[in-house]
Each structure stands twice: as C-alpha cells, then as structure tokens.
Image (cartoon, helix red, strand yellow):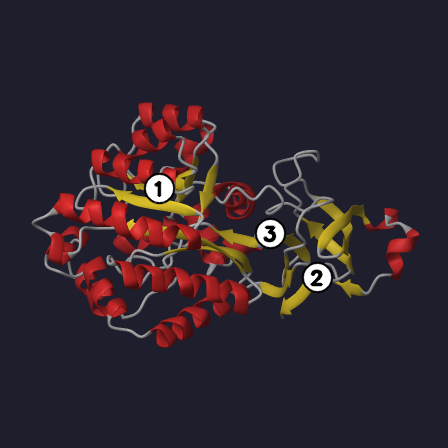
Amino acid sequence: MTDLVLTGIGQLVTNDPQRDGLLGLVDEAAVAIKAGRVAWVGPERELLRELRDLPELDCAGRSVLPGFIDAHTHLAFAGNRAEEFARRLRGETYEEILAAGGGIHATVEATRATDSMRLLDSSIQRAKRMLGYGTTTVEIKSGYGLETETEINQLEVAAAIDDELAIDVVPTFLGAHVIPKEFIGDRAGYVRLVIDEMLPAAAPLAKYCDVFCDEGAFTVDEAREILAAASGHGLRARMHANQLGHSGGAALAAELGAVTADHLDNITSDDVAALKAAGTVAVLLPTVSLSLRLPAPPARRLWDAGVPVAIATDCNPGTSYVENMQLVIAIASLEAALSPEEAVWAATRGGAMAIEAEDKGVIKPGAVADFVVLEADSYVEIPYRPGTDLVRIVIKNGKVVAG
C-alpha cells in the first residue's frame, strides 16, 4: 500500500455512476491515492493543495482505466493441446475430441501427472503475464484434477499466486467440470465423491463453487444437488451454462440466484428474463467462440435486456489460451457487438460485479487503487488496435507493479 498522485491524465475512465456516461469520463484529470485506496478524483485544476505534495506520477496525457478483472479462468493447468487446436481447424468438433478422450480429459491427465512445484511455476508465469497486460484481479478455477488431491493442489496453487504476486486471486472449486474417465459408468458415484469428499476439503480454500452444466458434462439435477451441497459449506454458486447447447443451466443459475452464469451461447428469451430478474451476472467469453469458430456470444441481447455483462479470457489450454484482457475487449467489440465503452465496462466494472467486489472496477473515493495507464490517449485504442499491448503501467493498491 502506498500514497501517490497521478497527474496529467488525458482521459480518465472512472466507471463512477455519479458521473456522466457509462464510463464516467473525466478529461485532464488527476487521482490521489492514500494507503492504497482512491482518496480524490477530478479535473487536475481542482486538485487540493495538500494532495499535490504526494509522490507524483505524470501520465503525460495518457488514458487511465481501472485494472482489468478477469472473472473466468482455468489458469492452473499442465500440458499442451496445440495439436487438438489444429485438429479442430481441420474439421473435428470439440465434442468429438472430448468423446475420444481429448479436451478436458487430456488436461486432467497432464495436471494429475505434474508435481505441485512445476504446476505452481507454470501458473505463476501465466499470472505474471496477465498482470503485465493490465489484469489486477483474476478468478482461478480448479477442475483439472477430478479427484480430491489434484483439485486441492490447484486451489493451493491459486492461493500461492495470490501470496506471491501483486495480483488478487479469487478461487473457485470446479470439481464438477466433467465426469472423469474412471467414473464414466458411474455418474452418481462421481457426484457423491464431489459432494462427500471434495467439497469439504475444498471449501476452506475457495470462495465459489462452479458446475459445468451442459451437454457432455453435468445435468441440471446433478448441478442442483452439487450447488446445494456447496451452499452448505458457505460457497456461492457460479455456473458454466448453455455453452454447447440449451442445457437448462442458465435457468438453473437464475433459479439458484447464482452470482454468475458463464458462456451462455445458447439462450432463450425466457433465460434472459430469468437472469435479469435474478441479478445474475452474464460472464461472456468471446475468445472461446473465436477459437472454436462459433458465433459470438449474445452480448448485445443480454446487455440490451439489462443483464449485467462481464467479459473474461477463459484462459485454458484447449479452447482459449488467452492471457490478455485487451484482446478480449477487442473481440467483444469486433465480434460480439459491444461498443468500445461497453466492452471496457464489462472488462472492469462488469468483472468486479462477477466477483462481488464493490470496491473494484471503479475509480472513486474509497475504491481500491488498481489502475492501468495506457500507451494511448483513449480507451478506444484497445479495440481499434487489436493485438497491440497498450498497457504502459500497472498500478496495484496504489503501487506501480509493472511498466
């Protein structure tokens, strides 16, 4: 934690609803930080005299945004699925590869076979790159163990990243990712393993429980049972829902009041209305659709209906090996019909809503001082220049940690 004043900000994105417009823009701005939190925000000409004595960072006309919040990742994994990626490009479907023992099963096999230190090292390297790209908070799921020891190992890796790097980690238990190979003939037995053994062990290490409720994964009834048990351990619900088909997962997420419903590529008007009524955040993953060469997620439809929208990388080795939220913003604008303003909001304030962090994704007094300083004078440059890393400086809790 530190004290700092940012001056010379050409365009400041605050996301403050008390200011005009979706992004609450302030031109020719300054931000004062005390003890790692925002103390003052406004036009630099109004900066209080006593705040001018703080250590200064001159942004030289650059744009400043809240730090990106990546609200859906599978960051802790081992193995490589580049060949599987090539097979998809040659015409095989994701479902065909999964049924043949590839996909998630291949990553489970590699992750189970990797020792804790190697898994931690590779995961830390990914998280470091994410931080350099401007992600200051990341959600990390388990789900590549599908047995208790490796699931716990993944959650311990997430905790170690939180301890060792200047990036906040939100841990999620995803033991109900798919049915592992050894339980293919005993679905009920695996559900009991998740509930009776994995959940009690994982609960002290996680904030959320996620279930992949979709074709080839878990049914609505199985997901409901697992999430009810998770609630008994104090874990809030998240759901992979309606990615591969109209599975009923989105409706269940709304029924349970889940914090998020993620993917949502196949939804109906009833699903949209239910999610809005429940206040569930739609976490959309546009780089997954890009990788799988599928239609973009229904961002415009959800946004226009008033469902809170977040966007995330879904960083994983199979369907979206993406670590850069700037690319996600660009694809959300170019392919998923969000405006640049909406995409930036979804990557910052929307992400904060998806992890229930009221004091993140916004630049206003009392908020956590997590910022990115762009090598550009406007946030519009992010989707305008896809593939370019425009983050010059990353500030975490008021301290420069990258750039």
Q: Amino acid at mark 2?
A: Met
Residue 180: quarter of image: bottom left
Instruction: Name the quarter where the C terminus is drawn.
Output: bottom right
Q: Nearer the viewer, residue 174 or 21?
A: 174
* Residue beneath disc 3: 379
Question: Is residue 92 visible to us here?
Answer: no
Dot 1: element: helix
Q: Which mark is residue 230?
A: 1
Mark 2 near mark 1, Cβ–Cβ under 8 Å?
A: no
The tag on residue 1 is 2
Q: Which type of secondary structure does the marked residue at label 3 adopt?
A: loop
> Residue 332 placed where, x, y %?
43, 47
| Type of amino acid at the residue the image marks with label 3 | Tyr
Q: Say whether residue 313 is left or right of residue 251.
A: right
- Image: 376 above or below 110: above
Q: Is residue 200 left or right of residue 325?
A: left
Q: Residues within 10 Å of mark 2 (few under 14, many from 20)?
A: few
Pick whichever of labels 3 and 2 is earlier in the sequence: 2
User: Rounded to the nearest whole Å, what is the CA distance between mark 3 and mark 1?
Assistant: 39 Å
User: Where residue 342 sits: x, y (%)?
Assistant: 52, 41
Q: Earlier in the sequence, mark 3 or mark 1?
A: 1
